[in-house]
Amino acid sequence: MDGHHVTILEKEAVCGGMAGTFRRGKFRYDFGPHNIHTSHVHLLEFLKKSFGDDFRAYESVTRIYFRNRTFPYPFEGMESLKTLNLIDATLCVWGFFWQRVVSLLKGNFKSDGTYRTWLVSRFGQYFFDIFFGPYTEKVWGVATHELSDIVARKRIPVQSLYALVHAAITRRPKYHPEHSRSLNAYYHRNGSGAITDFLVNEIIKNGGEIINNATICSLIRDNNKIIELKYSNMRGEIQTIQADLSEYIDFTVLSTIPVNQLVLYLGEEIPNEVRQAANELDYAALVLLYLDLDHIDPLGSHILYFSEPEFPFNRISDVGKFSRDMVPEGQTALCLEVTCSVGDAVWNMDDDEIFAMCFSPLERHGLLSRANVLDYHTRRLTHAYPRFRVGYHQRLSTIYEYMETSIDNMWMFGRQGLFTYINTDDAMWMGIQVSSNLPMRNKIGITARDLFPKAFDS
Ligand SMILES: Cc1cc2nc3c(=O)[nH]c(=O)nc-3n(C[C@H](O)[C@H](O)[C@H](O)COP(=O)(O)OP(=O)(O)OC[C@H]3O[C@@H](n4cnc5c(N)ncnc54)[C@H](O)[C@@H]3O)c2cc1C
């Protein structure tokens, strides 16, 4: 820790955030599937060295369930073309060419910055209507015309109908360079939380202090420096951490708290437009439904996506397929992800209601049987995905410009701190970058936007 005294304040009883793992009976579960696929070579070497054989490479099988059949995802080989019946395939191709004709007649397709326009112009209206549209609205919980095209540009692995057909014929998909399929996948045999537990132990071993059940609620400033943090403990009592004023030049706050909450902790003095920008940024929440089953490999894949609205969940992952060490012999657990917003009807459903809602289409389609379910239970994530609504980037810039110019001793990073769609490996890599650049922030005012330009490149 380079001579710094480190204190970590964590709201929950355990550290790890969404990358943690929890135990229930003989099962262990991640919060949705958490494998590591990274282009950060040094980080990968570090993980391999730290965990040895416990950190295993594996071949991920990912499929989509669509029109009563499954097919590989991302799209591969003739199998994916065969999945569509003749009428659907004809209408998709017709929709694509019609879109081209419209573009030619009207001049180039006008990009209005929305997800819907971006997709329709590349895949045609029909394919959008039967596939991308319903799936996207399920995952993000937002209408596609309200969503920014950054979601499509960053997250769709094959970037046009032409590329899709090319991939189908040649079996050589041209994935988006950042897509996980271009990288090897690794998984710790005891779940993603084994990695975060290891990091926590390293921090403690090196003299750091961790305070759990500590919810930060206020940041106190003296001119351009944070000099005090207030947090509430598990009894709701307000506690304070203060900078040593004689040397507070070295007091630095590193935050992975959702940035739209953090800025409000600065109190009444923040400008109105910053407050408004913070209130207009939001996150999709997730209810995770776990099903413990009396047999293994019920889906034939690690992850099965469901694009059709009949299924209220986005995808199902098979815990035992990622690692047999997570589940008892001869059994497995599935994790179903249901998007919602904190406080809405789905968020407030009890476990029985969630189970009934999710399980009936699975039974109807003959995918699972109630007789094989040993138990079910849920977990909730309040900040699963930043919602990239049209205009979010301007709001984020308003907050960042204010934070960067008015506070010298704070960094925001991670998925929540930057309001960006990053994975665990990026979050760890950002932690390493921020800690090694600490002196630069204090000396020449380097910021997270300088260090991680790609997170803001939209
Ligand atoms: C369903 C799902 C599947 C995923 N699958 C993968 C995958 O396969 N591979 C992968 O690499 N990544 C995956 N991810 C992404 C991964 O979970 C995130 O990238 C990673 O957890 C981001 O870490 P973070 O620290 O930025 O945010 P978080 O994990 O959200 O951590 C933020 C922390 O801040 C704490 N906190 C918040 N507010 C306060 C406060 N006021 N005071 C104190 N503490 C506070 C929270 O309790 C939490 O511990 C997945 C995410 C989801 C939702």
Image: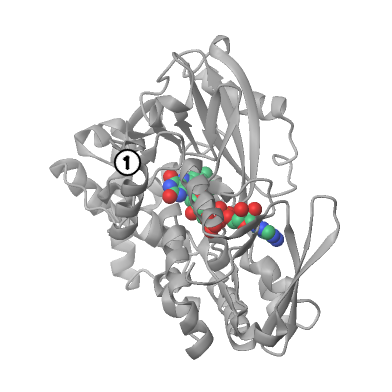
Is residue 311 visible in this depiction of the protein? yes
Residues packed near mark 1 inside 10 Å, few (<14), some (14 to 19) or many (20 plus): few
Question: In which quadrant of the rendered view does residue 275 lie?
Answer: bottom right
At label 1, which amino acid type do we have?
A: Gly
Choose between 195 and 4: the one closer to the eye.
Answer: 4
> Horizontal placement of 422 versus 165: left or right?
right
Q: Which SS class for mark 1?
A: helix
> Horizontal placement of 330 versus 82: left or right?
right
Residue in view at x 49 percent, y 76 percent:
448
> Residue 429: horizontal and vertical position, in percent?
41, 62
Choose between 310 and 430: the one closer to the eye.
Answer: 430
Q: Is residue 250 above or below residue 384?
A: below
Q: Which residue is mark 1?
A: 52
Is residue 136 visible in this depiction of the protein? no
Q: Which residue, as the protein is rendered here, is positioned at the far left?
A: 170
Residue in view at x 47 percent, y 78 percent:
449
Q: Is residue 385 above or below residue 366?
A: below
> Horizontal placement of 1 versus 228: left or right?
left
> Residue 170: horizontal and vertical position, in percent?
13, 44
Where's the C terminus, which quadrant?
A: bottom left
Residue in view at x 52 percent, y 60 percent:
415
User: Colour mode?
Assistant: one colour
> Residue 17: horizontal and vertical position, in percent?
58, 50
